[in-house]
Amino acid sequence: MQRNAMKPSISDLPILATPQRVADVLGLTKAQVRGLIACGKIAHIKVGSRLVIPRDAIEIFIIENTVQPCRDETRDRAFASSKKGNVSISSGLMPDAAASVQRVLRIASSLKPR
């Protein structure tokens, strides 16, 4: 096995790439790439029965799904009133979790005896 073998990059892909080639470049499995296609996270084109991914769609996927780090000044202002030196950050309930909680409460309310 060669240690100096370079990993393929996005620019090495053809304009339309198979899920397997995209998986190789991104360091994912073919199933993970197909999952991204199935849930609409990455654009694709269907050619007959084959799925291909435009090279530009990969770059767009990366840009749109990159999580930016929290800037220090934002974090400091958010906890300026805290007297603790060891503060954790919580993003709160995710929208899906909040909707699930509301649904459970509605069902529980409808099941209560009158």
Image (spheres, rainbow, N blue to C red):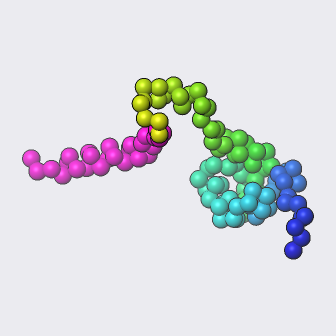
Q: Which residue is drawn at 22% across and 50% down?
A: 108
Q: In this rendered view, identify the residue nearer to me: 46 or 28.
A: 28
Q: Position of residue 73 (x, y in %)?
A: 58, 27
The residue at the point 89 percent across, 70 percent down is: 2
Q: Position of residue 96 (x, y in %)?
A: 44, 46
Q: Residue drawn at (61%, 32%), measured in percent from left and top? A: 71
Image side of residue 74 versus residue 22, left or right:
left
Compared with 31, 71 (above or below) is above
Q: Where is residue 41 in the image (x, y as percent from the top left)?
A: 63, 49
Magenta residues, start to end: 87-114
Image coords of residue 77 (percent x, y) = 51, 25
Q: Can residue 12 be seen in this view?
A: yes
Res 31 → quadrant: bottom right
Q: Which of 91 and 107 is in front in this view?
A: 91
Q: Which of 6 and 96 is in front in this view?
A: 6
Residue 18 makes an appearance in the image: no
Q: Quadrant of the N terminus?
A: bottom right
From this view, report whether residue 62 is shown above or below residue 7: above
